[in-house]
Image (tube, rainbow, N blue to C red):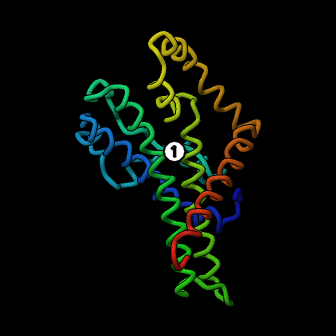
């Protein structure tokens, strides 16, 4: 999946816009469901990708396949159920990418079966194939990356929603070191050794489910 050739980068740009928009819209919509309209009032509960791009996080997605978006503004104090709201609002982004990745795979299979994507002597067929592979896998990578329990990723907030007040205080003391931990994991390649095998496992689950869908 990793590649720096011009075609790969060109295909990742529209994929980037799609997956980040889906991810952040899901956070904003779930927060609104739990009573927090902060993102809605600030114009972030929409499907405009320009509103959700983070320069560094977007560059990471283009180069290595996983990264982050500009977080939507959320005030957990507005949630009608604090811990439940924090948990599901945080999980909404990764969950939306996992669902969208599966839907993308289903659409891809349908397009192949009806002959709209073919490989017989056409550059279009190969580009379409590569586009859907990027769309499927980057959705999975983005979801898994954000589920890591490292602040400020979504996984850290999910974990916080389960911690007692005592352990929550201890965990928050680690937040100051989180950026260094994250950078270290990326530079050393440890992050890739965690995410890529998990992504293949998720893809295997997708493939297993698809076997039970007639016509696919």
Number of numbered discs on residues:
1
Work out whether 72 lies above or below 80.
Answer: below
Residue 56 in the image: state x and y as whole percent. Answer: 55, 42
Element at label 1: helix
- Can residue 134 be seen here? no
Q: Residue at x 46, y 15 (%)?
A: 164
In the picture, measured across the screen, residue 105 lies left or right of residue 63, that is left
Q: Quadrant location of residue 129? A: bottom right
- Can residue 116 be seen here? yes
Q: Which quadrant is the C terminus positioned in?
A: bottom right
Work out whether 61 lies above or below 115.
Answer: above
Q: Residue at x 36, y 49 (%)?
A: 25
Which residue appears farthest toward the top when viewing the image? 166
Residue 113 in the image: state x and y as whole percent. Answer: 56, 83
Q: Quadrant location of residue 78? A: top left
Q: Which quadrant is the N terminus positioned in?
A: bottom right
Which residue appears farthest toward the bottom when viewing the image? 121
Work out whether 89 lies above or below 212.
Answer: above
Residue 158 in the image: state x and y as whole percent. Answer: 48, 31
Q: Badge 1, how many Cα within 10 Å: few under 14, some, many 20+?
A: few
Residue in the foreground of this view, choosing between 16 and 104: 104
Q: Residue at x 27, y 45 (%)?
A: 43
Residue 103 in the image: state x and y as whole percent. Answer: 48, 64
Which residue appears farthest toward the right when viewing the image? 188
Which residue was labeled with disc 1?
Answer: 55
Residue in the foreground of this view, choosing between 152 and 94: 94
Work out whether 181 lies above or below 143.
Answer: above
């Amino acid at each position: 999946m990793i590649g720096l050739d011009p075609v790969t980068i060109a295909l990742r740009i529209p994929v980037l816009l799609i997956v980040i928009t889906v991810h952040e819209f899901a956070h904003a919509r779930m927060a609104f469901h739990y009573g927090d309209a902060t993102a809605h009032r600030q114009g972030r509960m929409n499907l405009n990708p320009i509103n959700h791009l983070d320069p560094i996080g977007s560059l990471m997605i283009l180069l290595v396949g996983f990264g982050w978006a500009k977080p939507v503004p959320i005030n957990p104090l507005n949630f009608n159920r604090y811990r439940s709201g924090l948990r599901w609002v945080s999980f909404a982004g990764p969950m939306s990418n996992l669902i969208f990745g599966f839907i993308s795979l289903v659409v891809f299979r349908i397009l192949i079966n009806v002959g709209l994507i073919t490989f017989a002597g056409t550059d279009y067929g190969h580009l379409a194939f590569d586009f859907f592979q990027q769309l499927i896998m980057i959705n999975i990578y983005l979801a898994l990356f954000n589920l890591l329990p490292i602040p400020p990723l979504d996984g850290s907030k999910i974990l916080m929603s389960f911690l007692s007040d005592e352990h929550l205080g201890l965990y928050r003391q680690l937040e100051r070191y989180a950026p260094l931990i994250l950078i270290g994991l990326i530079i050393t390649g440890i992050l890739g050794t965690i995410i890529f095998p998990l992504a293949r496992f998720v893809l295997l689950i997708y493939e297993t489910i698809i076997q039970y869908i007639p016509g696919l």
